[in-house]
Image: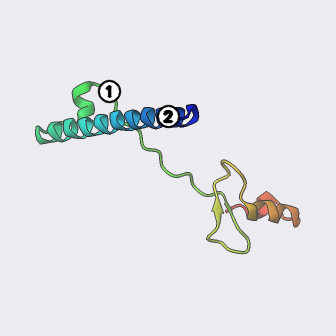
Amino acid sequence: MSLKELKALQAQVVKAISTYEDRRKRDALAELEEKAREMGFSLAELTGTPAGRKRAAATPKYANPDNASDTWSGRGRKPRWFEAALKAGATADSMAI
């Protein structure tokens, strides 16, 4: 085998080991959560860690003037329809919901 082939094989082995360990951790966590549930607890209660906070979806602030089902919360990258409307002369206030 050439050096290039050996390095490619080595990268594949490292990746396989990593995914194997991740899979084992997920399986162990699922098993522990199931056991805690059987006993009437959550795993977070038993370990003393706070449960993960779920965020609600951001409420839309702007709507596409051509298609009201296209909305944008004002967070993140501006959608193409928003940029196009601005270039066409519309204002952000005119598209506000």
Q: Residue 60, located in which quarter of the rendered image?
A: bottom right
Q: Amino acid at mark 2?
A: Ala
Say which residue label 2 marks.
11
Coordinates of residue 69 in the picture (x, y in percent): 61, 71
Residue lying farthest to the bottom in this orientation: 66
Q: Residue 26, located in which quarter of the rendered image?
A: top left
Q: Is residue 39 above or below residue 88?
A: above
Residue lying farthest to the top in this orientation: 48
Coordinates of residue 84 in the picture (x, y in percent): 81, 64
Residue lying farthest to the left in this orientation: 39
Q: Residue at x 65, y 72 (%)?
A: 68
Q: Amino acid at mark 1?
A: Thr
Say which residue label 1 marks.
49
Q: Residue 38, located in which quarter of the rendered image?
A: top left
**Cα separation between marks 1 and 2:** 35 Å
Coordinates of residue 46 in the picture (x, y in percent): 21, 28
Where is the C terminus found, in terms of image quarters? bottom right
Which of 95 and 49 lies nearest the eye of the viewer?
49
Q: Is residue 41 above or below residue 92?
A: above
Callout 2: helix, strand or loop? Answer: helix
Q: Is residue 56 above or below residue 26?
A: below
Marks 1 and 2, the one that precedes in the sequence: 2
